[in-house]
């Protein structure tokens, strides 16, 4: 790896939020191990970024990130537009494209950017809160939680934005998956399996006194069919602080099953199915589709979701007068077939 490779790698980690504004990057000796280069190469790359004003050497505090660099545009190319992808609630210190759901969406956005010749910039929630939308950005794709306020803020600046969810309260382009339909399908699946006493679970994020709109739509879809199928439904809100201790949460779920006669769970927030500890479950919105012997999955093709959102943003960037679009992506299912065949799952497209 040469000086320019290290230079580009550090730039990218700043842009993606792994190295955060006003915080120190790893020490030179650590960077030599990370990139497998000499200290001279690392020092040369850092010097170039200091000269650009991206980094600042600060004595005992180390080398501090002072600015998010602009994405480089290839000379003599048609890279005339820059797309910013922000996923709120991304985990601090982890690059968005390596996180589960936002990472799969990122691949779809990247595929469109490469095809359309756009520059692509990624921001973590932390970097967005410090830096906002850079002036050179032509359009924004936002996903995650608390989108209503973020979408309104970006719209006020006159920047095209596409939300990865359905937000009825704001006039903006939206590409999301069919949460209501997923809830309905989950209820039909429970009835098909013969479960009559069912518990709906949903995760409530720390600092919020409400459930995310997508979770509420999944619950509404489930209840819509549950009434027709004469299912008895209980609800359990799991606070994010409780979710940090999986063993404690498993004990709580087992106790609820014993006390109420619930025979199956329907998780409306895509949590790890392992928390249900062998109890039959349906997961709505799980971002990772690893095989699980007792869990049915109702999920979205998040890569396609990212591509369609970017494609829509491209159309709006090229024609600001385009009518608003609300596009729902149909659900997919991965179902456990039966007790004798639980080691296999079938994917219906």
Image (spheres, rainbow, N blue to C red):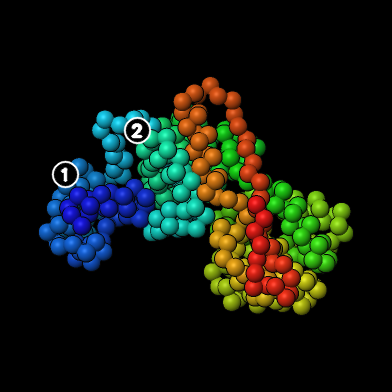
In the image, 270: left or right of 105? Answer: right
Q: Residue 5's spot in the image, x, y percent?
A: 23, 52
Disc 2 target residue: 79
The residue lying furthest to the top in this view is: 321
> Which residue is rendered at x = 40% and y = 46% of the image?
122
Residue drawn at the location 81% of the way across and 53% of the way down: 225
Residue 259 position by quadrant:
bottom right
Of residues 144 and 338, the one nearer the viewer is 338
Looking at this view, is 210 or 37 the one in front?
37
Q: Contact, CB < 8 Å: mark 1 with mark 2?
A: no
Q: SS for tag 1?
A: helix
Binning the other alpha carbons within 10 Å of mark 2 as few (below 14), some (14 to 19) or many (20 upward) gives some
- According to the image, label 1 marks what residue? 51
Residue at position x 69%, y 63% in the image:
335
Q: Residue at horizontal 22%, vertical 54%? A: 6
Q: Dot 1 surroundings within 10 Å: few (below 14), some, or many (20 or more)?
A: few
- Give the left or right position of residue 127, taking residue 231 as reference: left
Please determine whether, in this image, residue 228 is positioned above or below residue 110. Answer: below
In the rendering, at what x and y percent does residue 45 appear? 18, 52
Q: Look at the image and tell me whether residue 348 can be seen.
A: yes
Q: Which mark is residue 81?
A: none
Q: Position of residue 344 (x, y in %)?
A: 65, 69
Image: 117 above or below 224? above
Q: What separation in Å lies between label 1 and label 2 (alpha carbons)?
A: 25 Å
Q: Locate residue 229 relative to residue 160 in the image: left or right.
A: right
Callout 2: SS: loop
């Amino acid at each position: 790896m040469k000086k320019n490779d290290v230079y580009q790698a550090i730039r990218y980690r700043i842009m993606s939020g792994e190295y955060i504004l006003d915080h120190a990057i790893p020490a030179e000796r650590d960077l030599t191990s990370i990139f497998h280069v000499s200290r001279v190469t690392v020092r040369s790359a850092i010097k170039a970024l200091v000269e650009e004003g991206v980094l600042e050497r600060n004595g005992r505090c180390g080398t501090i990130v002072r600015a998010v660099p602009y994405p480089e545009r290839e000379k003599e190319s048609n890279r005339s537009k820059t797309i910013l992808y922000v996923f709120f609630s991304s985990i601090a210190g982890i690059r968005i494209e390596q996180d589960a759901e936002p990472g799969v969406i990122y691949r779809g956005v990247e595929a469109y950017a490469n095809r359309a010749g756009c520059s692509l910039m990624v921001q973590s929630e932390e970097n967005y809160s410090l830096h906002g939308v850079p002036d050179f950005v032509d359009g924004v794709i936002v996903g995650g939680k608390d989108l209503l306020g973020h979408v309104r803020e970006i719209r006020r600046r006159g920047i095209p934005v596409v939300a990865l969810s359905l937000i009825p309260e704001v006039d903006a382009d939206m590409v999301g998956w069919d949460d209501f339909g997923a809830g309905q399908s989950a209820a039909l699946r429970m009835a098909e399996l013969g479960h009559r006493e069912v518990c709906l679970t949903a995760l409530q994020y720390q600092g919020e006194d409400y459930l995310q709109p997508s979770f509420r739509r999944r619950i509404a879809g489930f209840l819509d069919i549950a009434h027709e199928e004469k299912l008895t439904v209980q609800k359990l809100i799991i606070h994010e602080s409780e979710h940090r201790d999986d063993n404690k949460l498993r004990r709580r779920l087992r106790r609820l099953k014993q006390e109420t006669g619930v025979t199956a769970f329907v998780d409306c927030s895509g949590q790890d199915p392992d928390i249900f500890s062998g109890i039959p479950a349906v997961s709505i919105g799980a971002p990772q589709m690893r095989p699980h012997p007792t869990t049915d999955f109702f999920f979205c093709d998040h890569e396609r979701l990212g591509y369609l959102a970017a494609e829509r943003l491209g159309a709006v960037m090229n024609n600001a007068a385009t009518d608003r679009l609300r596009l729902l992506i149909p659900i997919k299912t991965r179902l456990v077939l039966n007790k004798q065949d639980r080691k296999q799952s079938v994917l219906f497209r």
